[in-house]
Amino acid sequence: MKSLAYLLIDVVKYGFKGDARYKAWLGFLGIFLIFWAYGNYQQFTQGMIVTGLTDQVSWGVYLANFIFLVGFAAAAVTVVFPAYVYKHEAMLKVAVLGEMMAIAAVIMCLLFVLNHMGRVDRLWHMIPYIGIYNWPNSMLTWDVLVLVGYLLLNIICGFYYLHQKYTGKPINKSWYVPLVFLAIVWAFSIHTVTAFLINTMPARPMWNHGMMPIKFISTAFAAGPCVIITVFLLIRKHTKFVIEDSALNLLSLIITVCLGIALFLTMSEMVTEFYHPTEHAFGLRYLVFGYQGLGKLVPYFWASILILVVSFGMLLSPTIRHNLNMLPYICVAVFVGIWLEKGMELLLPGFSPSPIGEMTEYYPSFIEIVNSLGNWALGFIILSVLVKGAVGVLVGDINYEKHQAGQRG
Amino acid sequence: MKHRLPKSILTAVCLCLWASAGYAGNEDEIVCFESRKGSSEVVQREIRPDWPNVKCSPRTAGVLWWGDPFDGTIPMGDMPIEAEYSHAEAVVKPRDKQIDKNRLLTICTTACHDGKYVPVPTSLEARPLKMHQDIVPDSMNLQHGRGAIWCLNCHSAEKRDKLIDHFGNEISFNQPQILCGKCHGQVYRDWRDGIHGKRIGMWKTGAKKRWWTCTECHDPHDVQQGTRNSGFAQLRPEAAPAVPKGMKNMDHEQHVEHGDPAWWKDALRALFGGDEHGTAGH
C-alpha cells in the first residue's frame, strides 16, 4: 500500500514538472480555471437560471459536451482492444496511456453532469434508496452506473499496471487480463447507454431511431483516437518514450474506418428522413436546411459535413494517413467536425420542434461557456499530468527504489 | 297616506346605504374576478402566512390560481336528475353573495317588493320598467330568449330573492342550473357530465370538486352579447408567454406562406440571410 501512495505522489509530482513549453501549456489551461471558478460559484449558488436553457430547450452545451466526452472515454478501447485481443505489440506498450486518457475523459463527463444538475446538493438523488434514483427504470441511472463503473475499472487497471512497473514486479495476468476484457466490454456499454438515454424518447423523433448507438460508437472511435494520436505524437517528440509507427498507423486506420461508417450512417439517416418527409423529420430539417426563418445550426451542419467528408477523403489515401506531419492536422479537423456533429447539432434539433411544435433557438450564456471551457481545461490538465506521470513510470524516470533512495538521501 | 311615509324614509335610507356600500371598499384591496367580470369577484387575502386565496393577473384581473379551491364554497345540493357525482363531493360558490353584494337583493326584497309598496304583478307580459335599468337597459328588448320569455319566467313574482321552475316552485339563486336546465337541456347534460363549464379540486372519482354554476360565467340578462351573439362577454386575453431566453422575436411562428415553405428557400435564408419572412403575402 505504501508503494501505491508513493506512486501517486510521484506521478503527480512528475506530471507537473516539465520544460517551459509544458509549463506554459498548464498555465494556459489554468487561465480558464479562474473563469471556471467564477462560473461555477454563480451556478452552484443560483442554479440553472444562469444558463441559457429554456423550458423548450432544456439540454445545452453541458450535455452536448457530456455526450461527446463519453465517446472520448470509450475510445480508449481503440488502444486497449488491439493490445489485448489482437496482441498488438506496439499497442500493448501504450495501452496504459489510453486508460489514463479514459480516466481524464470520464472525470470531464462527471464535471459536465454536475454542471447540468444545476447545484451540487442535487447529487443526493444519486444515492440509492435515499434519493429518487429510480433504478432500473431510469436510463440516466444506468448511465451513471456504467460511467462510475468504467472510471473504477480504468483506475484499477491503469494504476495496477503502473504500480507493477513502478515497483518492478510482474503483472498477475490471472485477474488483470479478465479485468481488461471486462473494461473493453464496459467501454461499449457506456456509450451504448448514453445513446439509449436519448434515443428511447419517442416524443423526440430526431433521436428516436435504432442506429443511434452504433452511430455514437462509430463517431466516438473516430474522434477519440484523434486525441490519442495527437498525444502520442507529442510524447514521441518530447520524451524518451518510444511509440512505434505501427501503433499510430493502426489508430489512423481505425479513424478512417469509423469515420466512413459514421458518414454512411448520416447519409442513411438523411435519405430515410427526407425521401418521404413526415413531421418526424422537422428536427433534422431544422438542422440541415433551417425552418421558418430559424437556422442558427445550418452553417455548423454544413461545415461539419464538409470537414468530415474532406478529412475522410484524405485519410483514405495511405500516403496521407501515414504522413505523421500531416496527420495531427487531420486529427484536429475530425475532432472538431465530430464535436460539432455529435454535440449541439445532435442535441438541439431534438428540442426544436418540441413535442407540441414550438421552434426555439438556444443561446448558451457566458456562464455556460466558461464552465464548459473550464471543464475541458481541468480535464486536459488531469490528462496531461496523468499521461506525463505514466510516461515517467514507463521510461523509468520514477520508480519505487528511486523514491526510497530519495527519502533516505 | 300616513302609513306610506315611514316606508319612503326607510327606502331612502336604504338607498343611501346601498350607494355608500359601493365606496366602502378598501383602496389597498386587490379585487379580481374568477370567471365573469363584475359577477364573480373575489378579494385577495392570505388564508395562511404567505399563501393567498387567489393569485390574479395584473393585466386582466382574472384569477389565475387558487390557494384553496374550496374557499367559500357550500354543498351544491340536489340535482333534479341523478348524475355521476355524490352530494358530498360537489361544492359551489354561493351566488347570492355576489348578487347581494350591494345589498340590492336584500333591499329590493324587503323594502320594495313586499307586495304592498310595489304590487305583485298579475301578468308575465313584457312592460316598460322604471327601475333596474342597470341590469336590463331596455325591458322591452330583453337580451335573452329573443322575445319568448321575460323576467317573471325566471324570477318569482312574490319573492324577489327566489327563482322559479315551470310549476312556480322556488329555486335558490345558488342553484341556477336547475333554472337554466328548464330550457337548455342539452348543455345542462354536458355541464352535469363535466364536458361543459369549469371544475377545480380533486380529479379522483369520489373526491371533492368545485363546480362552476351557469351564472358564474354567463350573464342571464344578456346571454346574447349583442352582435357577438355569444354566451360570453369578450374577455381581454392574457399576455402572450414570454419569448424564450435569447430569442429576439417569435416571427417564425407566423405562416409566411401557405403550406410549408420550400426547404431550399429555408436553407438559402439560413445560410445567406436575406428577407426574414419570405416574399409571399399572408
Image (tube, rainbow, N blue to C red):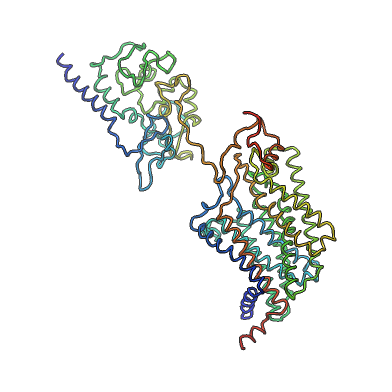
Indicate left or right for A311 with B40 as reference.
right
Give percent across and percent down for residue A52.
56, 50
Of all residues shown, which one is farthest toward the left? B2
Report the front residue among A41 and B124: A41
Vertical order, A279 against A89 (above or below):
above
Quadrant the C terminus of chain A occupies: bottom right
Indicate left or right for B4 with B146 as reference.
left
Q: Quadrant of residue A242?
A: bottom right
Vertical order, B7 against A175 (above or below):
above
Of all residues shown, which one is farthest toward the bottom? A409
**Picture residue at 64% right of the left edge, 87% below the top:** A405
Report the front residue among B152 and B43: B43
Q: Quadrant of residue B137?
A: top left
Report the front residue among A377 and A7: A377
Q: How many marks?
A: 0
Give percent across and percent down for residue A401.
67, 84
Indicate left or right for B41 with A8 as reference.
left
**Picture residue at 47% right of the left edge, 28% below the top:** B191
**Picture residue at 48% right of the left edge, 26% below the top:** B189
Quadrant the N terminus of chain A occupies: bottom right
Give percent across and percent down for residue A58.
58, 49
Report the front residue among A289 and A247: A289
Q: Quadrant of residue A326?
A: bottom right
Give percent across and percent down for residue A139.
62, 54
